[in-house]
Amino acid sequence: MNAKNDIQNLEDIQLLVDSFYATVRSNDLLGPIFNERIGDRWAEHLQKMYRFWQTILLEDHTYFGSPFPPHAQLPVDQIHFDTWLQLWHGTIDQYFQGKKADEAKWRGDKMAAMFLYKITYYRDNNATPLV
Ligand code: HEM
């Protein structure tokens, strides 16, 4: 089999994001959590996630949101983030290899750890995040 290419442009980001969320939606643990919140707004969510990863990986600043707040109250734990990361790494490895592919995995790891830390902190302290 030929060597895979790195993530290079918006089309690559779209392929990655579409494939990842298709897997997420059919995952027994994560699917229901996403589907319940996103409902019929999947097209909008995917567009937002293209912009998020485009901003991080291609340095094309199209995402202006705050990533954490929608996660603050989710019923999730270590096992959910482990599963999220397993699917994220798996999808990246399926299509790409290279510096950007490695960075996508690294960023995912860091964001997942940060989200889990904040979610657990707010839950344990019975507090609500301000931002
Ligand atoms: C257990 C893991 C995760 C779950 C269940 C989860 C779930 C969700 C849900 C339900 C939304 C809100 C969609 C909406 O109502 O519009 C969302 C948004 C988002 N998620 Fe996650 N997520 C997870 C992990 C992550 C990770 C690790 C990242 C970053 C690498 C991430 C990045 C984002 C971003 C950027 C948004 C859009 C925020 C905005 O509205 O601007 N998520 N996620």
Image: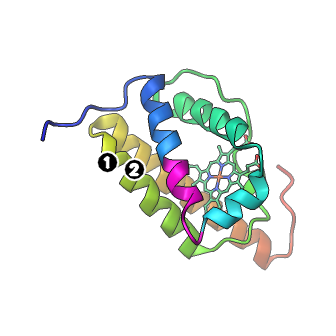
Q: Quadrant of the N terminus?
A: top left
| Classed neighbour count for the residue bearing mark 2: other residues with Cα under 10 Å, few (<14), some (14–19), many (≥20) | some
Look at label 2 and name its amino acid.
Thr
The percent coordinates of residue 49 (x first, y second) are 61, 38
Please, is residue 39 above or below residue 33 in the view?
A: above
Please give the range of residues in magenta.
Answer: 20-29
Q: Which mark is residue 91?
A: 2
Q: Is residue 71 left or right of residue 102?
A: right
| Classed neighbour count for the residue bearing mark 1: other residues with Cα under 10 Å, few (<14), some (14–19), many (≥20) | few
Look at label 1 and name its amino acid.
Gln
The residue positioned 83% from the left and 58% from the top of the image is 129
Q: Is residue 70 magenta?
A: no
Residue receiving disc 1: 94
Our reading of the magenta stretch's main secondary structure is helix
Q: Rounded to the nearest whole Å, what is the CA distance between mark 1 and mark 2? A: 5 Å
The residue positioned 87% from the left and 53% from the top of the image is 130
**Most foreground residue, 122 or 73:** 73
Is the C-beta separation of discs 1 and 2 under 8 Å? yes
The residue positioned 43% from the left and 62% from the top of the image is 86
The residue positioned 48% from the left and 24% from the top of the image is 10
Q: Which mark is residue 61?
A: none
The quadrant holding residue 46 is top right
Please, is residue 33 above or below residue 130 in the view?
A: below
Please, is residue 98 above or below residue 74 in the view?
A: above
The percent coordinates of residue 33 (x first, y second) are 70, 64
Q: Is residue 4 left or right of residue 100?
A: left
Please, is residue 25 above or below residue 47 in the view?
A: below
